[in-house]
Amino acid sequence: MYTLTGLKLKNPTILAAGVLGTTGASLYRVAREGGAGAVVTKSIGPAPKTGHSNPSMVRLDCGFLNAMGLPNPSYTGFLQELEFAKKNSEAPVIASIFGGNPSEFAEVAEGLLPAKPDAFELNVSCPHAEGYGAAIGSNPCLVEAVTAAVKDVVNVPVWVKLTPNVADITCIGNAAESGGADAVVAINTLKGMAIDIESGYPVLGNRSGGLSGKAVKPVAVKCVYDLYTALEIPVIGVGGISSWEDAVEMMMAGAAAVQVGSAVYNRVDVFSEIGEGIEAFLERKGYSDIKKIIGLAHEMV
């Protein structure tokens, strides 16, 4: 058993927001069949949102490009799904939420409290939803205010998911910590674009979107490494993790746990595979506790 911001996880792997998190049944499946230590919902907002027009996701040689646009049924429409996930899943269920300002974030968090989520993850990092996500997450003052507003209305851990599309991610991380965040999650997708050379049209309906998958892992590792040095609170690493080796690398950079997103496209049991791989690695290297490898790379300089 592994403890993260007071939550008990059977292993340090977590389903990332936006992947198989649109229904209570899918969250339950990832926890039960996939072996995830915890699961995060699709980001939920204050009002129903249809998202961007299709195509909204495309597979590339280096990963995935998506511009979903935060589609969701609103917190009132998602409450029943969250309740189902909480009732049936043995793994902690984290509600990912978004809003256009601090009061909307607080409204959504308070509205989901009846379902008793184990924690909240604040999406201040989506790169393709105008007025939301990174539009807020690139402003340290707004990040601090949003975090503080949610902390004022909930009594469970609050994680803040950070955007890499800024000059200095540690500045944003410090703002989240100042607002009372219990952990930060790094990173969300990188801004990206693909063009069909036959027609000349951008591939995505929204023209541009966010890049995820293997290509972003070195960026995520660097962000986690920097945040580990700058913050007192835990850093949860996400971005391009598809194997136990990726997870160990991220943890050596400073991640207290890892989230997995794009790799679920190929197999839902990737969480069990990563968890077992980490355990075997610790035993082979003679580490008595997983905490021995968290931030290990910082000791090698």
Image: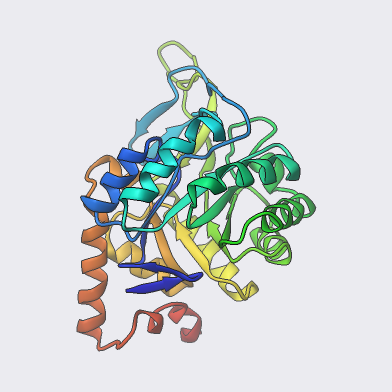
Would residue 231 appear left or right of 26 to someone viewing this image?
A: right
Would residue 298 appear left or right of 38 to someone viewing this image?
A: right
Q: Residue at x 45, y 24 (%)?
A: 56
- The location of residue 112, given as percent across then percent down, is 55, 44
Answer whether residue 214 is visible to the viewer in this image. Answer: no
Residue found farthest to the front: 114
**156 up-or-down from 67: above or below:** below
- The location of residue 55, given as percent across then percent down, is 43, 20
Residue found farthest to the top: 199
The image quarter in which residue 104 lies: top right
Q: Nearer the viewer, residue 26 or 155?
A: 155
Q: Residue at x 44, y 81 (%)?
A: 296
**281 up-or-down from 32: above or below:** below
Q: Nearer the viewer, residue 272 or 296?
A: 272
Q: Residue at x 71, y 43 (%)?
A: 136
Q: Residue at x 20, y 83 (%)?
A: 284
- The location of residue 148, given as percent across then percent down, is 73, 57
Q: Quadrant of the N terminus?
A: bottom left
Answer whether residue 41 is visible to the viewer in this image. Answer: yes
Q: Nearer the viewer, residue 301 or 96?
A: 96
Q: Nearer the viewer, residue 41 or 114?
A: 114
**82 up-or-down from 49: above or below:** below
**199 up-or-down from 18: above or below:** above
Look at the image and name its color scheme: rainbow
Residue found farthest to the right: 141
Q: How many marks?
A: 0
